[in-house]
Image (spheres, rainbow, N blue to C red):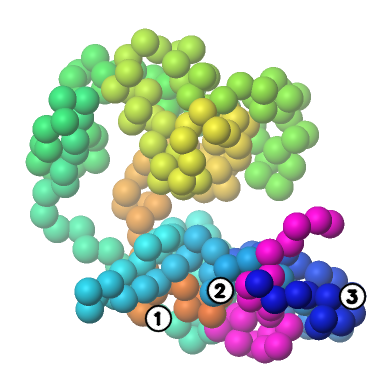
């Protein structure tokens, strides 16, 4: 690991993390006339956006989708001169239920029992109502923010129903899909915030909405091109230990 102190860096702003958000902030700050340094622990930029070639195939290992409500991302993709394409929508989907068996199906709803489907619909409606009250720019301002932040996403769902399959289906959207974390590791408030940023919880489970388009050549091109604009102000292999 390189010793950052030997670089003798003096900047107006130091940004920790060379993901899309950090690099966007760095570029905006530079446009405003400030000097910046972006410190990244990894040996690459992009954070969760990671495109790599495995066995000759280009794969997006991390985030890859552009949904229609992501206006800032859409504008950035266009400004960088990148192209998008719509996802492939033909054919069957595959659902692996609690029995471990793969079930082929068409349509939006997983092939669960009518009882489980009713539970999912009921709790989804409840979540949509809660999400509608959240300001995605100020989630802490909600009167129940502290209460919702004190209970895990998993615990809240299991307090609503004892239908384990319904819980697993409901938890997926903001758990392994969006935050890539186990559902006991983040709060109900964080889950609601993720849904609020998409407009509703229903949007997160609507494949035609959330899985709308992809970037030709991979979404990691966004942070890569943003980093190229910053040049020597991006420092890789620089984990931040203390602030």
Dots 2 and 1: beta carbons under 8 Å? no
User: x%, y% of residue 214?
Assistant: 36, 68
**Percent position (x, y) of residue 89?**
20, 58
Q: Is residue 228 above or below residue 219?
A: below
Q: CA distance from mark 2 to mark 1?
A: 26 Å
Asked if residue 34 shows in the view, the reply is no
Quadrant assignment for the C terminus: bottom right
Is 92 or 44 nearer to us in this picture? 44
Q: Earlier in the sequence, mark 3 or mark 1?
A: 3
Instruction: Examine the structure image and report whether residue 7 is included in the region drawn in magenta.
Output: no
Q: Residue beneath label 2, please?
A: 43
Tell me whether circle 3 and circle 1 mark residues in contact (CB < 8 Å): no
* Residue at point 32%, 14% (across, down): 163
- Residue 83 is labelled as 1
State the CA–CA distance, disc 3 to disc 1. Answer: 34 Å
Q: Secondary structure at mark 2?
A: loop
Foreground: disc 2 or disc 1: 2
Part of the protein shown in magenta: 225-243
Q: Which residue is mark 3?
A: 12
Q: Nearer the viewer, residue 38 or 66?
A: 38
The x, y position of residue 174, in whole percent, is 47, 40
Q: Earlier in the sequence, mark 2 or mark 3?
A: 3
Does residue 204 appear to the left or right of 100 in the view shown?
right
């Amino acid at each position: 690991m390189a010793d950052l102190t030997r670089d003798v860096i003096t900047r107006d702003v130091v940004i920790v993390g060379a993901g899309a958000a950090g690099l966007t902030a760095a570029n905006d700050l530079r446009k405003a006339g400030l000097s910046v340094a972006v410190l990244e622990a990894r040996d690459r930029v992009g954070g969760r956006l990671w495109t790599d070639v495995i066995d000759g195939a280009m794969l997006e290992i991390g985030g890859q989708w552009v949904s229609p409500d992501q206006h800032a991302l859409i504008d950035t993709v266009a400004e960088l001169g990148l192209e998008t394409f719509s996802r492939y929508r033909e054919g069957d989907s595959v659902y692996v239920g609690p029995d471990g068996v793969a079930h082929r199906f068409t349509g939006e709803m997983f092939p669960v029992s009518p009882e489980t489907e009713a539970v999912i619909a009921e709790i989804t409606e409840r979540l949509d109502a809660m999400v509608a009250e959240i300001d995605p720019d100020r989630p802490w301002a909600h009167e129940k923010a502290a209460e919702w932040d004190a209970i895990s996403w998993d615990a809240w769902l299991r307090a609503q129903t004892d239908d384990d399959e319904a819980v697993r289906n409901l938890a997926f959207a903001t758990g392994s899909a969006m935050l890539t974390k186990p559902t006991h590791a983040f709060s109900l408030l964080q889950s609601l915030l993720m849904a609020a940023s998409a407009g509703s919880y229903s949007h997160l489970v609507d494949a035609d909405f959330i899985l709308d388009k992809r970037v030709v050549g991979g979404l990691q091109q966004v942070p890569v091109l943003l980093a190229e604009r910053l040049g020597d102000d991006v420092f890789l292999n620089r984990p931040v230990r203390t602030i």
